[in-house]
């Protein structure tokens, strides 16, 4: 006969069993700090999920976004930077009563110079979901993503600073997705430092306009 605990009781048991997860990762460049590694969370959480009869599986990936920017490395050689982000839904299921389910969510971003940006974004989203749902944080979490903080970009010239300020204002005011994409192509022709400055505000506006576009299409009667 299976365990009679409901899903919420099992989650409480998992929280009591695990306690806080320490930060096993440490950056090796730039500003030094510790961060939670997804492997540390997975290894400990997997055992507790099995023991208390809870299944965790990814049920949905939303707001997927992947883009790349051309720049140079420290030696001045050409280098492509890949940036990804996503919202992840993870379903927790009572193994003995499968109709008992709940969904937890996490948002993740990943930065890489080859093909791992998407995987890093998914890993960070899963880590964020587990840390919040099971209250696993033992210390303040200060990492920007699961690969460490983005290296600080070079300082901008006065001319670049003016361009960035004007471009940010134009991006925020933009209400047309096609026009925003055209702006993005022009930004990619600028230096890596300018691209780094404009990437967050551009990405956020791109996300907002895409959400508005989806909402509008869902309202159409045909």
Image (spheres, rainbow, N blue to C red):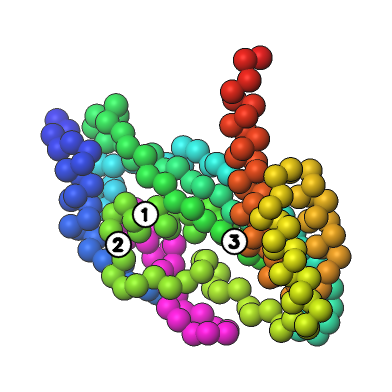
Mark 1 = which residue? 130
- Disc 3 crowd rating (10 Å Cα; few below 14, some 14-19, many 20+) is many
Quadrant containing the C terminus in the rendered view: top right
Q: Are marks 2 and 3 in contact (CB under 8 Å)?
A: no
Alpha-carbon span between mark 1 and mark 2 = 7 Å
Question: In the structure shown, which secondary structural element does the residue marked by tag 3 occupy?
Answer: strand
Alpha-carbon span between mark 1 and mark 3 = 17 Å
Judge by depth and name the residue closer to the eye, 70 or 210.
Answer: 210
Residue in view at x 27 percent, y 31 percent: 100
Question: In the structure shown, which secondary structural element does the residue marked by tag 2 occupy?
Answer: loop
Question: In the structure shown, which secondary structural element does the residue marked by tag 1 occupy?
Answer: helix
Mark 2 = which residue? 136
Q: Are marks 1 and 2 in contact (CB under 8 Å)?
A: yes
Mark 3 = which residue? 110
Q: Is residue 195 visible?
A: no
Judge by depth and name the residue closer to the eye, 96 or 78.
Answer: 78
Judge by depth and name the residue closer to the eye, 201 or 25.
Answer: 201
- Mark 2 and mark 3 lie on one chain; the one further toward the N terminus is 3
Q: Are marks 1 and 3 in contact (CB under 8 Å)?
A: no
């Amino acid at each position: 006969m299976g365990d009679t605990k409901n899903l919420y009781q099992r989650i409480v048991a998992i929280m009591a069993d695990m306690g806080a997860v320490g930060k096993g990762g440490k950056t090796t460049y730039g500003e030094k700090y510790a961060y939670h590694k997804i492997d540390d969370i997975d290894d400990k959480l997997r055992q507790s999920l099995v023991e208390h009869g809870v299944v965790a599986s990814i049920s949905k990936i939303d707001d997927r976004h992947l883009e790349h920017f051309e720049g140079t490395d420290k030696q001045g050689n050409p280098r492509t930077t890949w940036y990804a982000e996503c919202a992840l839904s993870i379903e927790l299921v009572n193994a003995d009563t499968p109709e008992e389910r709940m969904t937890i969510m996490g948002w993740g971003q990943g930065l890489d110079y080859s093909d791992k940006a998407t995987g890093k974004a998914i890993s960070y989203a899963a880590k964020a979901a587990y840390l919040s749902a099971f209250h696993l944080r033992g210390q303040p979490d200060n990492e920007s993503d699961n690969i460490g903080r983005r290296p600080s970009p070079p300082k901008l010239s006065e001319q670049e600073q003016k361009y960035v300020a004007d471009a940010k204002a134009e991006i925020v005011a933009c209400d047309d997705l096609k026009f925003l994409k055209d702006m993005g192509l022009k930004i990619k022709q600028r230096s890596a430092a300018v691209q780094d400055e404009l990437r967050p505000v551009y990405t956020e506006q791109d996300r907002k306009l895409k959400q508005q576009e989806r909402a509008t299409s869902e309202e159409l009667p045909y």
